[in-house]
Image: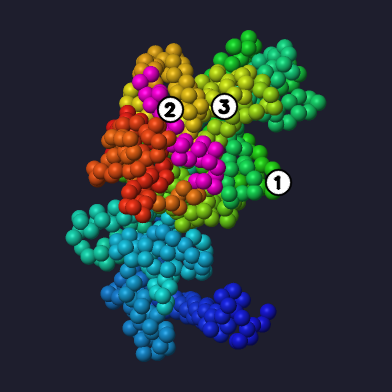
């Protein structure tokens, strides 16, 4: 399409093309032409320099250059990869018998004969020093890299030396400038954030030990630093893993399979006239993502079963799950006929895990890799994967940078592992970052707008309609998840919808509260935790609270702690029953006061939340005294006292000592009145007001 100078600009700005994007298009075209010319001149010059060296050096002298590189690489771990740097080595690093590098030698010889652009280019090359840079952001046409030593940020466009934005990748290389753009000079390996940290620490160590300037260290120890960036090469070492095969004779195969399906332990892979193939699986996980057109369902596969008539063969390389299967068969009174064990060679650095993936059109099956990565990332939040501590423990210690580094490593690893199959969609690390209150990653597809969730789907027995409990996945990777789910199932299986709703409210509140704690078991939970959850967290967190809902929550707290004590021999129930007895009526009073200003039906409305956020700022006040027409409130933050007018219905519900999170409005007469109420707490919540 041809666009006239005076036509409206197609970008939609409303301006004429000549006053809007015509200049931008011209600038872009000029930049493209300059870049093409830059690479043409650069390639031609490098070829001429290398040809010059071939002409100047005898065969033995050329061999000596290669031997010198071999000596440099004697102590490195990645010799084969670093040998690719020979063209850069012979031109920029190696000093010949005349004391000059190949580049200096060529320049001194042809300086007067070079064209102006060639001479300027070589003069730039002569000043280049290796820099350790890391990709920290991206744009539509390139990446932003940060120099790890100076903090300077440079724009590197996509071109023949940089094809894509590799999340948090880094390089130690020569980097040259053209206008406001920067390009790799020579060769560069882009490695992960772990490698960048290793190279950075190695460089710092050398600067301290040698007391040399940065430039000297960068050249003298170039290959040593680059070797640290790359890290340990794949060893290719194989290790032995046991593959267990269990043989059973099952009298009633159909009943056996039906029983396992009912327990949600298997999926049917293939059924033929000869037999049936099954997978022994874990719970089904549902992955929802606003970057996808539908959910992804995944289940970890622990083993495989081959049933032919009444003969069953079970195979697995997961010994713990094999033991679970054996115990299951014992409980079903199915005797083991034969057990055989084979040793299988597997790569030593690989953790084996298999997943069954189910998607519906138009979601491609490759999105299973995204769901698997997110499941593993959530699981590892609570695993000791960082120097013997979990990422959550590092956060609790205030070491956000350690968790940031861990997330960057995962993002880089997932990109290199399967981005070619899932592009442009990436794993959603930003949902995790949001939960951990870390800054978003610029490399996540859809950026800060990306949202995803994982649920463990747990069938609730023989319920009408085969309903399922959608459990947020982060329950299962925390100490409380399995217990809350087991308690819920025990109390609700075969019960009415009202009973299910009662316990659903209670376990949801408890899960939300304990997610704010970094405990590892119920032994870490004390009386103060139950008190905080009941008198403060519940009232603060949920906007749609009601007296009836609170009764359900408190009843669930009592039932659950009794259940815990019976299972673990703990003493939680006595604390909770004592707390509930003390504060129950005061909690109901607080809710009734809130209900007077904002009825339950109003607060339940989604639109009310949007309006609520747009109104005046609220502050926390405590009721100091109540008279016939007014009440005195103390601002918790400043201790300032305010006298407010109170209508009779409000005074009837307001109690001395209550905490009210509210805003004030002022009458024309100058008197204060409550504008709106966000939350109300009993006096018992005083401990948590600061």
Of tags 3 and 2, the one toward the viewer is 2
Residue beneath label 2, please?
Answer: 588
Of residues 618 and 352, the one drawn nearer to the viewer in this rendering: 618
- Check the image and report above or below for 364 versus 247: below
Please give the range of residues in magenta.
Answer: 581-609
Mark 2: few, some, or many residues within 10 Å (few <14, many ≥20)? Answer: some
* Residue drawn at (51%, 68%) of the image: 141
Q: CA distance from mark 3 to mark 2?
A: 20 Å
Label 2 secondary element: helix
**Residue 423: % across, % down:** 58, 55
Sequence-first disc among 1 and 3: 1
Q: CA distance from mark 1 to mark 2?
A: 49 Å
Of tags 1 and 2, the one toward the viewer is 2
Q: Residue furthest right?
A: 273
Quadrant for the N terminus in the image: bottom right
Of tags 1 and 3, the one toward the viewer is 3
Of residues 534 and 407, the one drawn nearer to the viewer in this rendering: 534
- Check the image and report above or below for 654 versus 488: below
- Check the image and report above or below for 15 versus 635: below
Q: Is residue 356 visible?
A: yes
* Residue drawn at (81%, 26%) of the image: 273
* Residue drawn at (62%, 29%) of the image: 468
**Residue 570: % across, % down:** 38, 16
Residue beneath label 1, please?
Answer: 361
Sequence-first disc among 1 and 2: 1
């Amino acid at each position: 399409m041809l666009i006239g100078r005076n036509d409206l600009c197609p970008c939609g700005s409303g301006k004429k093309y000549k006053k809007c994007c015509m200049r931008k298009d011209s600038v872009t075209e000029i930049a493209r032409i300059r870049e093409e010319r830059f690479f043409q001149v650069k390639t031609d010059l490098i070829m001429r320099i290398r040809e010059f060296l071939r002409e100047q050096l005898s065969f033995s002298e050329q061999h000596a250059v290669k031997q010198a590189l071999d000596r440099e690489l004697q102590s490195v771990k990645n010799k084969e990869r670093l040998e690719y740097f020979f063209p850069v080595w012979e031109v920029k690093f190696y000093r010949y018998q005349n004391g000059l590098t190949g580049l200096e030698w060529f320049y001194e010889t042809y300086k007067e004969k070079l064209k102006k652009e060639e001479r300027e280019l070589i003069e730039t090359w002569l000043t280049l020093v290796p820099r350790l840079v890391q990709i920290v952001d991206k744009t539509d046409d390139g990446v932003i890299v940060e120099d790890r030593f100076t903090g300077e940020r440079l724009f590197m466009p996509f071109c023949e030396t940089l094809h894509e934005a590799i999340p948090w990748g880094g390089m130690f290389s020569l980097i040259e400038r053209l206008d406001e753009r920067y390009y790799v000079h020579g060769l560069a390996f882009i490695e992960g954030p772990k490698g960048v940290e290793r190279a950075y620490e190695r460089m710092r160590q050398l600067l301290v030990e040698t007391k040399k300037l940065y430039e000297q260290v960068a050249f003298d120890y170039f290959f040593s630093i680059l070797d640290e960036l790359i890290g340990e090469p794949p060893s290719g070492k194989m290790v032995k893993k046991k593959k267990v095969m269990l043989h059973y004779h099952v009298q009633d195969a159909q009943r056996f399979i039906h029983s396992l399906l009912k327990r949600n332990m298997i999926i049917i892979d293939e059924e033929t006239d000869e037999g049936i193939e099954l997978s022994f699986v874990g719970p089904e996980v549902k992955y929802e993502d606003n970057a996808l057109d539908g959910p992804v369902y995944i289940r970890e596969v622990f083993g495989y079963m081959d049933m032919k008539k009444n003969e069953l063969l079970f195979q697995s390389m997961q010994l713990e799950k094999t033991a679970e299967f054996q115990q299951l068969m014992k409980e079903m009174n199915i005797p083991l006929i034969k057990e055989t064990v084979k040793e299988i060679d597997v790569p030593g650095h690989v953790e084996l895990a298999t997943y069954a993936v189910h998607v519906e059109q138009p979601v491609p099956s490759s999105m299973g890799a995204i769901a698997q990565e997110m499941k593993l990332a959530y699981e590892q939040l609570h695993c000791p994967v960082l120097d013997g501590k979990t990422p959550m423990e590092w956060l609790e210690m205030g070491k956000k940078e350690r968790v940031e580094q861990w997330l960057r490593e995962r993002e880089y690893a997932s990109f290199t592992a399967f981005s070619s199959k899932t592009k442009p969609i990436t794993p959603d690390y930003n949902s995790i970052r949001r939960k951990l209150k870390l800054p978003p990653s610029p490399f996540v597809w859809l950026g800060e707008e990306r949202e995803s969730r994982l649920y463990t789907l747990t069938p609730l027995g023989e319920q009408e309609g085969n309903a399922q409990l959608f459990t947020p996945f982060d329950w299962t990777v925390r100490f409380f998840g399995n217990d809350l789910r087991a308690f819920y199932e025990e109390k609700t299986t075969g019960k009415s919808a009202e009973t299910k709703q009662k316990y659903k409210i209670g376990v949801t509140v408890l899960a939300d509260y304990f997610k704010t704690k970094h405990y590892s078991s119920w032994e870490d939970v004390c009386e103060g935790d139950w008190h905080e959850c009941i008198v403060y967290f519940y009232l603060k967190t949920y906007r749609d609270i009601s007296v009836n809902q609170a009764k359900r929550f408190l009843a669930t707290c009592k039932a659950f702690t009794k259940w815990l004590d019976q299972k673990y021999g703990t003493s939680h129930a006595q604390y909770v029953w004592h707390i509930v007895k003390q504060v129950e009526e005061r909690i109901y009073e607080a809710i009734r006061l809130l209900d007077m200003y904002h009825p339950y039906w109003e607060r339940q409305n989604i639109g009310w939340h949007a309006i609520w956020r747009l109104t005046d700022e609220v502050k926390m006040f405590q009721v100091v005294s109540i008279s016939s027409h007014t009440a005195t409130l103390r601002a918790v933050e400043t201790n300032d006292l305010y006298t407010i007018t109170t209508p009779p219905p409000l005074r009837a519900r307001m109690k001395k000592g209550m905490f009210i999170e509210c805003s004030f409005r002022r009458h024309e007469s100058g008197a204060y009145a409550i504008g709106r109420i966000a939350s109300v707490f009993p006096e018992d919540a005083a401990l948590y007001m600061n």
